[in-house]
Image (cartoon, helix red, strand yellow):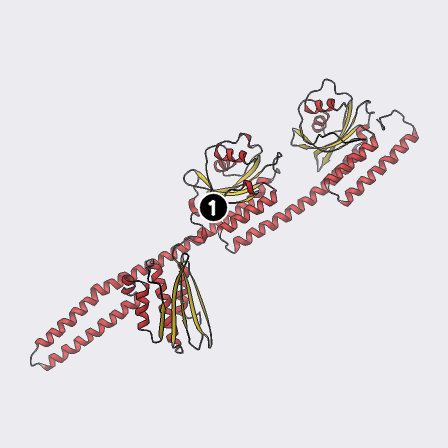
Amino acid sequence: MGGAPTADGGAEHDRIRLVAEQAALRRVATLVAQGVPADQLFSAVTQEVGRLFGPDLAAMGQYVGSDSLAALAVWVPEGEPPDISRTWPLKGESLSATVLRTGRPARRDHWEGTTGPIAELVRELGIRSSAGCPIVVDGHIWGILLINATTTVWPVGTELRMADFAELIATAIANTEARAAVRRLADEQAALRRVATLVAREAPAGEVFAAVAEEVGRLLDVSLATLYRYEGDGTVSVVADWGEFDARLPIGTRFPLNGDSLVFRVRQSATSIRMDDFAQMGGTIGEHARKMGLRSGVGAPIIVAGRLWGGMVAVSRRPEPLAADAETRIVQFTELAATAIANIEARSELASSRARIVAAADDERRRVVRDLHDGAQQRLVHTVLTLNMARNAVEGNERARALLAEASEQAQRATAELRELAHGILPSVLTHGGLADAVDALASRAPVAVALELPAERFPPAVEATAYFVVAEALANAAERGTAERADVTAHVAGNELHVEVRDDGADGARSDRPGLRALADRLDAVGGRLEITGRAGEGTSVVATIPMRREPEGEVSLRAGSSP
């Protein structure tokens, strides 16, 4: 080999060697200062070491855990270097294992009789002797720098001369890792802020879940990130996922918990979990993961109000495991998802409670109206008939006839007032005839001309009652302002909503802070509807109500489907 080890210790040789070493170190230091990409730096350092020491093969590797070494860069003086770009187990005897175990530079003058995958590779490449120096980053052995000769033995101390290069590499790696850590932290905080913003503005659960899956998937650079919910029947269902198209699952997909998997382990432990090898993962989920080529992953639980609701997994197709802190990094996102679920459940429960109060009030109105009609009103009608009969039966007593006539008149007025009172509470025609008939009766008594365009179909009682009160309040508002001459009442169904609009031609616009309209807005809000009031002087007023006909809290029909293990 061109630069083979030599025993010449002459002063001139030492001076030339020192100058060459310093020049090589300066070139490497310049690259470190420039912050070149890691793969470019590794190749450059390996090349400098090769040219300086004159080996037949120079290499750099990174330790993966405590039992393997990944080749990062290889240099040979001529031609193409051998393809050793893989992770090598540190089994048997090897220089790399010795350096990792001792943490010090080492040499091996021969490889005869050694065992293990690396020893087999060395003999296959015809290497006779090797020297190596550890690359120590932040106090831990990160990797190794190696030189190999095929015909000679390295002089004593060769491995120590490599230390300066190893230190430069360590400095570059530490700088790179520090910059990467800062970038990663900044990216992670930005992702958390984006999700937290969705939670704070009370975005629907589906939107929050999709954002969490995407943010985690991008941060961890995985093939697939999935949020799932534990169901009460022993299955898990997908609520959101992000990743490579062929690995994604439709929302709502269910899997049975019938074997060992990340999802199963998270349910059993209610803590974050990692699996670095899916080869032994069992059950339906394991079979699906292997079919999709997924090899490793991490998972974390979603715990809502002390109960295990579901979880999240991030999985990869790459052969190497995810970063050591991957499972702890996704915990912050699952906590945000749990907060969103808790908020939505609380809002849903509040909305359901308010809707039940409205429904109960309407039921009570119907009962009062029924009792008035069947009780007091019927008795008053009977009283009127009896008084009229008594008046006809009294002969010659004008005073008695006059009193009976007055009593009959008062009873008739009371009957009419009672009928109006019952109608104001909730008209019986609404119950028996539906919205169209009730609004028609309402329009007939309005002090302004009313044009109607209403569907003849029947709707749920709560929907009809709400729509009726919208029309009644809007017409009353138009009459109270005193400038309207005409009102148009329209209603139509769009999807699962009933849209009602009352538009008048009053010269003065309505104010949404009027007590009646505020109460109407509260009622609509309680049933999950919306009220919009627009009006300006000279343009009339429009009252538009959107009333849901089927209650679904925020697009999530079963947020509480999860069960504790």
Instruction: Specify the quadrant that holds the N terminus.
Output: top right
Percent position of residue 386, x then y: 13, 71
- Would residue 352 be visible to someone looking at this image? yes
Answer above or below: position of 120 versus 516.
Answer: above
Left or right of 183: which side holds 517? Answer: left
Occupied quadrant, residue 4:
top right
Name the one closer to the observer, 84 or 344.
84
Mark 1 lies on a secondary structure that is: strand
Answer above or below: position of 554 versus 23.
Answer: below
| Residue drawn at x 43%, y 46% as measured from the top left | 560
Percent position of residue 369, x then y: 26, 64
- Would residue 171 be visible to someone looking at this image? no
Percent position of residue 294, x then y: 56, 36
| Residue denoted by label 1 | 304
- The single residue placed furthest to the top in the displayed view is 113
Occupied quadrant, residue 438:
bottom left
Left or right of 397: which side holds 523? Answer: right
Q: Specify few, some or many for label 1: CA neighbours under 10 Å numbering under 14, 14-19, or 20 or more.
A: many
Occupied quadrant, residue 37:
top right
Instruction: Specify the quadrant that holds the C terminus.
Output: top left
Answer above or below: position of 26 versus 396.
Answer: above
Percent position of residue 186, x then y: 64, 49
Name the one closer to the observer, 505 or 211.
505
Left or right of 263: which side holds 363? Answer: left
What's the amino acid at mark 1?
Val
Answer above or below: position of 369 versus 226.
Answer: below
- The single residue placed furthest to the left in the displayed view is 395
Left or right of 349: which side holds 200? Answer: right
Name the one closer to the observer, 8 or 504.
504
